[in-house]
């Protein structure tokens, strides 16, 4: 077992646990964006959103919402970012599904990603192409 999150779940590596039930674990990120940054993971190993069964995915977001409320209230945050990196190109480093719950504070100096200019015809083509994949 090489997955660091699986080792945390198994108790082989310690963590600062925030929440645990039979299917999910939430703990403080050791490299936080802001203090109170929490990672929420399923206990069952799934590499990313693409390998996550729908049943687990639906339960996952209920837990994430609960953790977001706890983080906001505990940290007195002005806002919350919820994010999930999937695959290397998107910045995923640990290949065990995990959702970041990050407290945000007015004036914390963190920036969001930039925007790209895309014209209306490109937007239309992209939307049509995506609709073609809906089953």
Image (spheres, rainbow, N blue to C red):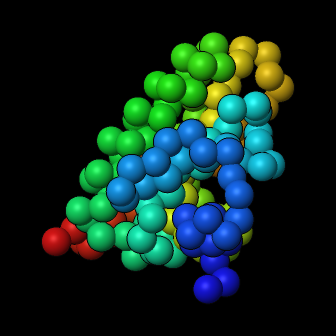
- Residue 37, position as x, y percentages in the image: 67, 38
Task: Out of 1 and 68, give the one closest to the viewer.
Answer: 1
Percent position (x, y) of residue 39?
A: 59, 49
Q: Is residue 22 left or right of residue 40?
A: left
Q: Looking at the image, which is closer to me, 133 or 10?
A: 10
- Residue 116 on image: x %, y %: 64, 48
Q: Is residue 124 visible in this depiction of the protein?
A: no
- Residue drawn at x 49%, y 52% is 25
- Residue at 64% x, 28% y is 103
Q: Please tell me which residue is depicted at 71% across the width and 19% down the height of the picture.
A: 105
Q: Nearer the viewer, residue 107 or 98?
A: 98
Outermost residue toward the bottom in this view: 1
**x and y, in percent, of residue 106 in the image:** 72, 14
Is residue 33 among the parts visible in the rendering? Answer: yes
Residue extending farthest left: 135
The quadrant of the rendering that contains the C terminus is bottom left
Side of 44 relative to 47 (left or right): left
The front one of 63 and 106 is: 63
Work out which quarter of the rendered image holds the N terminus and state it. Answer: bottom right
- Name above or below for residue 70 compared with residue 67: above
From the viewer's perspective, is residue 90 above or below residue 46? above
Q: Residue at x 60, y 19 (%)?
A: 74
Q: Is residue 117 left or right of residue 105?
A: left
């Amino acid at each position: 077992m090489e997955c660091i999150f699986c080792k945390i779940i198994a108790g082989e590596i310690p963590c600062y646990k925030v929440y645990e039930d039979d299917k999910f674990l939430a703990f403080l990120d050791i490299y936080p964006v802001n203090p109170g940054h929490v990672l929420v993971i399923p206990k069952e190993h799934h590499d990313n959103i693409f390998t996550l069964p729908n049943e687990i995915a639906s339960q996952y977001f209920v837990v994430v919402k609960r953790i977001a409320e706890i983080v906001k209230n505990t940290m007195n945050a002005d806002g919350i970012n919820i994010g999930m990196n999937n695959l290397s190109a998107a910045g995923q480093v640990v290949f065990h599904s995990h959702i970041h719950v990050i407290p945000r504070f007015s004036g914390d100096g963190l920036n969001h990603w930039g925007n790209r200019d895309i014209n209306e015809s490109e937007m239309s083509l992209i939307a049509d192409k995506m609709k073609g994949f809906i089953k």
